[in-house]
């Protein structure tokens, strides 16, 4: 909602009674967990949560991939879990590189394909972890999202924040985009700012684009071989960020197709679209079954300043001896 990212106006005030109710329910739920009246599951291996305070895509998936690679290079055996947002299940489920996105979720399919790591999905994170540990030799788990899933104990918390939209108008849902207030940033171990300026103690992140790959078969295409005029599609939290990144490369976007985050794509969504089409990698895993040969996705990799992977390893070594 556009008004979430503007100074709070009449829309926010109109919804403020619902926001107050949301705050009350959220605060009560946290209190019940803190008092032990609601059960918390502690996994037998360290759990790292990569989440956010606001709804919509903030860039968690590239962070998960980058940190998983850092842990793997350090000799650890990371595994991944996720809720499987928008997926049909059944849950819990192990995720493979060729798992149907409709069954396990677009982000989970992407993570499994890119990382090559063991992964499980399901709304019940405990069940997902137990399935993963029963099937694979894993010594640390990264959870894609789940910052507010207090039924799962965590050892390290990482918040990813959109550097342009940041916390929006600062209000809780539905008056604003926040699941929890800005106070939560002081409670986590790391704050990663995706684009824009990072504050003191925060980690700046940039997304580096790789070569476009054909959606149908992952064949790479050099940027210079793309036509100057292309179409672009994005079903992510902030489609404008993707469109802007293409325009910065000097591409002229003849048409911009913006869809809701986790949109369930079908061939009908692209009726009348001809010629070269660029999309995000997350969208590509859902479009592969019906993709034309002129459709390409743009993979991205996260880079941090300073080195977030090293800081994460230091905590794991000092707290857990890994």
Image (tube, rainbow, N blue to C red):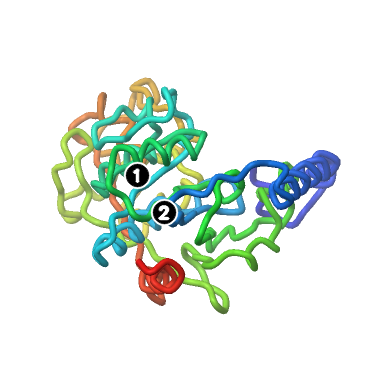
Comparing 197 with 18, the one in front is: 18
Q: Earlier in the sequence, mark 2 or mark 1?
A: 2
Residue located 24% across and 64% down the image: 75
Comparing 105 with 4, the one in front is: 105
Q: Position of residue 53 (x, y in %)?
A: 61, 53
Residue 138 appears anywhere in the view: yes
What residue did someone put label 1 on?
280
Question: Circle 1 — which element?
Answer: strand
What residue did someone put label 2 on?
45
45 vs 9, left or right, is: left
Residue located 20% across and 49% down the image: 226
Q: Mark 2 or 1, which is nearer the eye?
A: 2
Question: Circle 2 — which element?
Answer: loop
In the displayed structure, 42 sits above or below 321; it is above
In the displayed structure, 310 sits above or below 174; it is below
Residue located 17% across and 41% down the image: 218
Mark seen at residue 253: none
Residue located 21% across and 54% down the image: 211
Q: Quadrant of residue 186?
A: bottom right
């Amino acid at each position: 909602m556009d008004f979430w990212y503007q100074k709070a106006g009449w829309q926010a005030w109109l919804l403020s009674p619902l926001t107050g109710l949301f705050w009350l329910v959220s605060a009560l739920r946290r209190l019940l967990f803190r008092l032990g009246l609601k059960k918390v599951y502690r996994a037998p291996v360290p759990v790292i949560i990569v989440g956010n305070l606001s709804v919509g895509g903030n860039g968690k998936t590239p962070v998960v991939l980058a940190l998983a690679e850092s842990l793997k290079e350090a000799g650890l055996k990371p595994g991944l879990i996720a809720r499987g947002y928008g997926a049909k299940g059944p849950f819990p489920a192990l995720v493979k590189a060729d798992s149907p996105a409709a069954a396990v979720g677009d982000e989970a399919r992407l993570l499994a394909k890119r990382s090559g790591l063991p992964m499980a999905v399901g709304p019940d994170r405990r069940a997902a972890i137990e399935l993963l540990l029963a099937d694979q030799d894993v010594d640390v788990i990264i959870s894609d999202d789940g910052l507010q899933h207090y039924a799962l104990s965590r050892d390290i918390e990482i918040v990813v924040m959109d550097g342009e939209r940041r916390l929006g108008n600062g209000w809780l849902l539905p008056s604003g985009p926040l699941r929890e207030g800005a106070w939560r940033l002081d409670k986590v171990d790391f704050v990663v700012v995706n684009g824009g300026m990072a504050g003191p103690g925060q980690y700046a992140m940039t997304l580096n684009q790789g070569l476009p790959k054909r959606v149908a078969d992952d064949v790479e295409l050099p940027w210079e071989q793309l036509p100057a005029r292309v179409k672009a599609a994005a079903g992510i939290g902030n489609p404008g960020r993707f469109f802007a990144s293409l325009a910065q490369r000097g591409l002229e976007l003849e048409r911009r197709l913006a869809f809701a985050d986790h949109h369930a794509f079908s061939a009908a969504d692209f009726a009348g679209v001809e010629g070269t089409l660029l999309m995000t990698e997350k969208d590509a895993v859902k479009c592969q079954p019906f993709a034309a040969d002129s459709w390409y996705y743009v993979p991205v990799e996260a880079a941090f300043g300073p080195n977030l992977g090293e800081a994460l390893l230091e905590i794991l070594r000092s707290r857990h001896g890994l």
